[in-house]
């Protein structure tokens, strides 16, 4: 993504949302310390207008989890493996 001109932060998202202006959040659904659904819900408590993209590997239940992220406030949900072109077009769409 940096090759496309985007700066990337890999930090505790809640601290960043509270202290900095972000243009977009991309989160995985399944992460070791905090899952993406919890992240989306916490971010929505602080920012109702921050665009959020959630992603997850395909599995029989991935569609259910992807839909849940949309229900929690994600703007888009993408199934892995992510097509870079699709991701970049989604980013551009959400930033405009």
Image: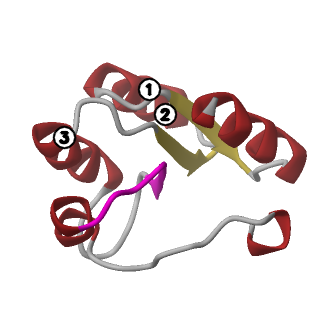
Q: Which residue is mark 3?
A: 41
* Magenta residues (range): 20-28
Q: Secondary structure at mark 3?
A: helix
At x 10% / y 39%, what residue is drawn? 45
The quarter of the rendered structure image containing the N terminus is bottom right
Q: Are marks 1 and 2 in contact (CB under 8 Å)?
A: yes
At x 67% / y 42%, what residue is drawn? 91
- Work out how far the residue at label 3 is from the one at label 1, CA to CA, in angstroms: 17 Å
Circle 3 or circle 1, nearest the eye: 3
Circle 3 or circle 2, nearest the eye: 3
Looking at the image, residue 48 sits to the left or right of residue 27; the answer is left
Give the class, few, some or many, for how many residues have Cα within 10 Å of label 3's Cα (few <14, many ≥20): some
Q: Which mark is residue 64?
A: 1
At x 89% / y 45%, what residue is drawn? 85
At x 27% / y 28%, what residue is drawn? 72
- Residue 8 vs residue 82, the one in the foreground: 8
Q: Which residue is mark 2?
A: 61
From the top left corner, tell me how far across and down residue 15 is, in percent: 17, 71
Q: Which mark is residue 82?
A: none
Give the class, few, some or many, for how many residues have Cα within 10 Å of label 2's Cα (few <14, many ≥20): few
């Amino acid at each position: 993504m940096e090759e496309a001109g985007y700066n990337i932060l890999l930090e505790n998202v809640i601290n960043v949302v509270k202290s900095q202006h972000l243009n977009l959040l991309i989160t995985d659904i399944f992460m070791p310390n905090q899952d993406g659904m919890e992240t989306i819900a916490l971010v929505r408590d602080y920012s109702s207008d921050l665009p959020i993209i959630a992603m997850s590997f395909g599995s029989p239940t991935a569609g259910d989890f992807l839909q849940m992220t949309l229900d929690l406030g994600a703007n888009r949900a993408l199934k892995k493996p992510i097509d870079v072109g699709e991701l970049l077009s989604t980013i551009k769409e959400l930033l405009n």
